[in-house]
Structures are given as C-alpha cells and as structure tokens.
Amino acid sequence: MFKYQDGNYEGYAPNDGYYRGGDEPAHEEDAQSDVTEGHDEDDEVYEGEYQGIPHPDDIKEKQKKRAPAVADEYRDRADLMAERMEDEEQLAHQYENIIEECGHGRFQWTLFFVLGLALMADGVEVFVVGFVLPSAEKDMCLSSSNKGMLGLIVYLGMMVGAVMLGGLADKLGRKKCLIISLAINAAFAFLSSFVQGYGFFLFCRLISGLGIGGSLPIVFAYFSEFLSREKRGEHLSWLCMFWMIGGIFASAMAWSIIPHYGWGFSMGTKYHFHSWRVFVLVCSLPCIASLVALKFMPESPRFLLEIGKHDEAWMILKQVHDTNMRAKGEPERVFTVSYIKTPKQVDEFIEIQSSTGTWYQRWLVRITTTFKQVWDNVLYCLTAQYRMNTLMLAVVWFTMALSYYGLIVWFPDMIRYLQEEAYESRVKIFDEEEVSHFTFNFTLENQIHRNGEYRNDKFIGMKFKEVRFEDSLFEECYFEDVTSSETFFENCTIISTVFHNTDLYEHKFINCRLINNTFMNQKEGCQLDFEEDNDFLIYLVSFLGSLSVLPGNIISALLMDKIGRIKMIGGSMLISAVCCFFLFFGNSESAMIGWQCLFCGASIAAWNALDVITVELYPTDKRATAFGILNGLCKFGAILGNSIFASFVGITKVVPILLASSALVGGGLLALRLPETREQVLM
C-alpha cells in the first residue's frame, strides 16, 4: 500500500489501507493531510505544533514502542472483514459530514448536466430504432422477423452492458467506466449510420446498446456520491428528467429529419445515405457531448476512499468545496477536513512484474482477476445481508419494466392498427372491369380489383400502394418503371406480358398462372414507400409520451424526501395499474394517446424512486454492481414485454391490459415491504 515518505502519512502500514494518525482519538481527528500541513524546510519549525497536533517524529517513536501487530496475511479473513465493516460505517458518517461541509452548488450542478447528457443518450437510444424502422426496412429489405430482432437487439445490448460495465465501475472507477461506456456507444452509433448491410447494422446497434446500457447504473452511483443525504432523493429525481429530454429530442429530430428524403446522398447504385441515417447520426450527439465534458470532471472521492486512495479523494473534496464556496461569494472559507477514514483493504490483488511472462499473459491475469472480483460482487448481493432486498427489488424492477416497456411499444402499435383499420374501411373495390389499350401512368392506392380483364394495357412510371388484383386476367400488357408497396396478384392469369424495371417480384404473384412472360432489369433492393408512410402522428405519440412525464418528474422530485421512496414506488405503481384499466375505453387514436400520456405520467415517479432506493440500499463497493444487475433484469423484462404485448395487437386488448395491471399491482404491493432509506447515509 501507499506510504508517504515525509512522515505525515506514516500511519499507512504496508498491508493496511486504514489510516492511523496516532494513539489518542482526539489526535486522530486533528491530524493534518500532507497537502495542508508539513514542516517548513527553511527553518525546520513544525507548523502543526501551533494547532496542538503531534509531531510525526513523536508518532513514530510511539509506534516503535508498541508491540508488533499481527500481519494481515496471518489474520482470519472474517476478522479483516469485520474490521472493514466497522471502518465502512465510520467512513459513511464522516463522508456525509464532509459533503455537507462542501455544500451543494456549482460543482454538483455542473456534474448534473454532464451526467444528464449521458442519461439523455440512454433515452435517445430507446427510441432510435423504432423511428428508423419504417425507412430502414425498405432500405435493407427487412422481413418481419428481421424488424422484430432489430427492435429487441438494443435492449439485449443494454442488458449485458448494465451487468458487465456496472460491475466494472465498482473495481475500476465511476469516471473511467462511464467514459468507456459512452465511447463504445458513440463509436458504434456513429458507425451504424454509415453501414449498409442488415447484419452489420444489427451488430453496431447491439454494441451501441451495450455501451449505453452500462452508463445508466454508473451515472446514478457516480452522482449520488457527491450529494448529501438531504439533497440525494430530490436531485437524483431531477437527474431522471434527462431521460425524458432524450425522448423529446429523438422525437423532434425524427419529425424534422426522416421525412426529408433529400437530406442524404448516393454513391452509385450500391451505397445510399438516406435521411434516416442522418437522424441516427444526430442522435449520437448527446453521447459525444457528455463524453467530452466528462473528461473535465473528477473521479468519485467516495470510490477513491473505498480503495484506500486518501490523498486523491481529499484533493477532489477540497476542489468541490472551493468551487462551491467561490460560487457563493465566500472564497475565504477554508476546507477544515484534514483526515478521512479509509477502510481496511482486504481484496487479493495479483501484481505481475513486467519481466514475468508475455504481455498478453500479464493482461490475461489482470482481466481474469478483475472479472473474478466483479463476479464476487454479484454473489455478494445475494448473501444473507442483502438477499431479501435484492430479490424484492428484482421483482419490482422486472414487473415495472414488463408493464411499462410493453405498453410504450403497444401504444404506437395499437395506433398503427387503428389507422390501418380506418384505412381499410376506405378501400375501393372494382368488380369485373374490362380495360384494353389503356395507359396507366398515375398512382393506384388502397384498391381491390376482382375478376377484371386487362388486354394490351400499359402500366408506365406509376406506383401501386395497397393494391390487390384477384382472379384477374392480364394479356399482352406492359409494365415499366413500376414501384409497388403491399401490392399482390392472387389467382391471376398473366399471359405474354413484359415486366421492365419493376419491383414486382415472384412472391407478389400468389397462386398465379404465368404464361410466356418476360421479366427484364428487375429493380434491385427495396424501394422506399411514399412519404406519407413516415406519418408524423407516430413521432407525435412518442413526443407527447415523453413530455407527459414532466409533471410526474417534478412531483416526485419535490416529494421524494418528504413522503419517502417506498410510498412513492408503491403509490405510483398502483395508480399506474388503475390507469391501465381505462385502456379498455381507448377505441380511437386520440383516446389511446391520452391514456398513454396518463400512464407515463403516473409511472415515472416509481422509476425515479426505484433509481434512488437502489443507490441507497447497497454499499459503495457494490453499488454500481447491484444497480447493473437490477437494470439488466429490467431490460430483460422490457424484451419480454415488447414481445408479448406486440403479439396481441389486433387480436385482443384484454391480455396486455390485465398482464400490465396485475404486474404493477403485485410489484407495487411488494415494494411496500422494502426498507425506507431516506434517512440513511451512503454506506
């Protein structure tokens, strides 16, 4: 361990991360950091003597007279852990007092906005794929199964990233792991806007999701460690607002960019950069901005103290104090803290000399050791001390995610279904029409042609949208430069007809008799649908859904520390369950939008309180790990919710509504059994 050579930190024993300033407790409280005290090299006068602080040489003499202590390696691990737990408790209360002395001001607000941008990037990531699918499915010729996989792959990446990077943050540091997370997300989100193939695009979105999924547990653990007990619940709730801002940003950008097909370029016939790719590019900006700003922020001092880095933690806390005091117009106020408890270090680290083995062997050992420690942390969350809290939180997180993410996907799907029903109700049906020697050069849309006969007709430079030809005859016709969407020929007879530069592929002829026909220069790839397909209503639904959480965010922030985390979770989930029942009356687009806004506004308080209580229930060296596990489970619930709820669209509303409401009631009642943490210091 670190040992300061000048004498002031002689108390750092070689195998002990526990700082000891002397024999007397009073002296321990007053011992000075090497940053603030020392001795004057010019006149050899010890400055600390005027403050009643023992001279380091006196402390050394006393230590020499002591009986030699038993080395840590010969002590029982249980004893070391018990000593560490005692140190942790002392540090928790002392750190709370230090943060209160530092105050809440400019430093916390700066960090608030930097971490807010990272949380905003998470909100954006959830919406990106849903917005680009209508355009990307044509650009990449996606089947229904491919579209479903693209929608779920982001959540899968988030699930893995939350567990993996959240665990690493407890070993490598909050700032370092958050930078890694944001860098992964920014790089692969940026890259995904340029790749052309479906497989590579899917891979990029998976890794991008892994990066941003890892940032969520780190953001809350990081920010909470700069907040005092009386500010923690409120300001963590304010931080949650950036997720809403991310949703609004994504909706507004989609609305502004995607419908403009001209906002792109092409390179030959193989490479196309359409407007939806511009949208994907723009959506990576919050992540990049947070990544740049984070470089100027310090590591969490609470984490540094946990691993025994006293001096670095002290310097950061002094920086927080001085920044806030200068902003308040009190630059003369002195940071009075000189000694901070550091818990006993009991982790087994393996250090390999540079001359030992090859470079990859050394890295392999370090990586293996780190992941073993992360796995130990995961198991620690299931030990007797935390098992019940972890299991109850897991159920609450899962039920909340199942219902919330399931419904926010179900709402747009239901609105699309209602739109399709209204669209189909306006279909025009043509029976037994006979057309010959006629040139079609206009758009046909939402039509059904039955038992018709078309002889020597030309279909040139036109579009078919939602058109069906049933039991019809086409003889000696000519199709040129034709684009079709959801257009099919069923049980038709097609004789001596030429198809030139069309997208009427084989699968569009269902049970048809094709006799002596010619297909030339068929269009390659998929064609973009009409611009109306990018209906602004879908963007508006997501925009209003994100905006509707604003009242719930404000209420939860103002009441979080007044009514407590438990009542906030239970009350919010039960109110959300009641809102679900009113969905039975949502038989129009406007009604569905209204109930979606009400549901999102009611449920956001539960999300905020869950974030806060998860941070507060676990100690510093397990906090990000536990948050990562629970958030990973949350994303698993989101995957199940998306899959289950989407499968019932157009079939029945009963199953999604009953499933969501019962999950919310069960989770809300269980949440009431969790311990209240608003009066608790961060362990």
Image (cartoon, grey):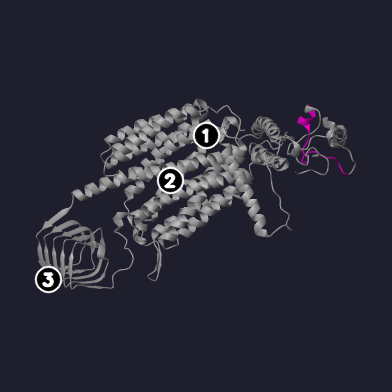
Classify mark 3: residues with Cα within 10 Å, few (<14), some (14-19) or many (20+).
few
Going by the numbered disc 3, the residue's amino acid type is His
Residue designated by label 1: 390
Residue designated by label 2: 247
Residues rendered magenta in the picture: 26-41
Tag 3 near tag 2, CB within 8 Å: no
Looking at the picture, does residue 409 appear above or below residue 522? above
Q: Quadrant of residue 543?
A: top left
Q: Quick one: quadrant of the C terminus?
A: top right
Which numbered circle lies on residue 437?
3
Classify mark 2: residues with Cα within 10 Å, few (<14), some (14-19) or many (20+).
many
Residue at 31% of width from left, 63% of height from top?
A: 527
First along the sequence among labels 3 and 1: 1
Looking at the rendered structure, the secondary structure element under dot 3 is loop
Q: Quadrant of residue 96?
A: top right
Going by the numbered disc 1, the residue's amino acid type is Thr
